[in-house]
Amino acid sequence: MRDKNFIWCEGTLKLIIEAISREPLYVVHYEGFAQDTDEVLFRNSSRLARPGTYTLRSDIPRYKFDEVNKKSPPQVENKISLLSDLNLAIEKED
């Protein structure tokens, strides 16, 4: 699952809410986070992906948890600086 900070995280589907004439909703839990960060997403949300699709990649940002305490909020590891990437692209064009 992709969180609101555009970081892909492992998660658990806690509940499916179905209604007539409406797309099902998923209640999801982000692994390693407190329950108050759980979210409700539509089934076809672009923030959902099959397990490992993004979380197993090393070229995208991910959270680094305190392995002893698993405290939230975790630190971001492999953070991509869009501004520095943009500057590099501009320098290459010159």
Image (cartoon, rainbow, N blue to C red):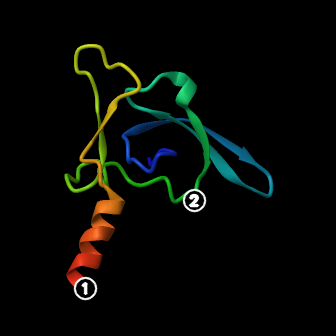
Q: Secondary structure at mark 2?
A: loop
List the single residue furthest toward the bottom.
94
Which of 75 and 16 lies nearest the eye of the viewer? 75
Residue 26 sits in quarter? top right
Three-letter amino acid code of the residue under disc 2:
Asn
Q: Quadrant of the C terminus?
A: bottom left
Q: At x 32% / y 19%, what residue is drawn?
A: 70
Label 1 Cα crowd, 10 Å radius (few <14 / some 14-19 / many 20+): few
Q: Position of residue 76 (x, y in %)?
A: 31, 39
Q: Position of residue 46 (x, y in %)?
A: 51, 60
Side of 60 where 38 appears, left or right: right
Which of 4 and 10 lies nearest the eye of the viewer? 4
Residue with the mark numbered 2: 44
Residue 31's place in the image compared with 42, above or below, is: above
Between disc 1 and disc 2, the foreground one is: 1
Q: How many marks?
A: 2
Three-letter amino acid code of the residue under disc 1:
Glu
Q: Position of residue 29 (x, y in %)?
A: 49, 33
List the single residue furthest toward the top.
69
Q: Secondary structure at mark 1?
A: helix
Residue with the mark numbered 1: 93
Residue 73's place in the image compared with 78, above or below, is: above
Q: At x 48% / y 44%, what residue is drawn?
A: 3
Q: Position of residue 47 (x, y in %)?
A: 50, 54
Disc 1 or 2, which lies upstream in sequence? 2
Q: At x 35% / y 61%, what residue is drawn?
A: 83
Q: At x 66% / y 50%, what residue is drawn?
A: 24
* Mark 1 and mark 2: Cα distance apart in space: 39 Å
Which of 83 and 80 lies nearest the eye of the viewer? 83
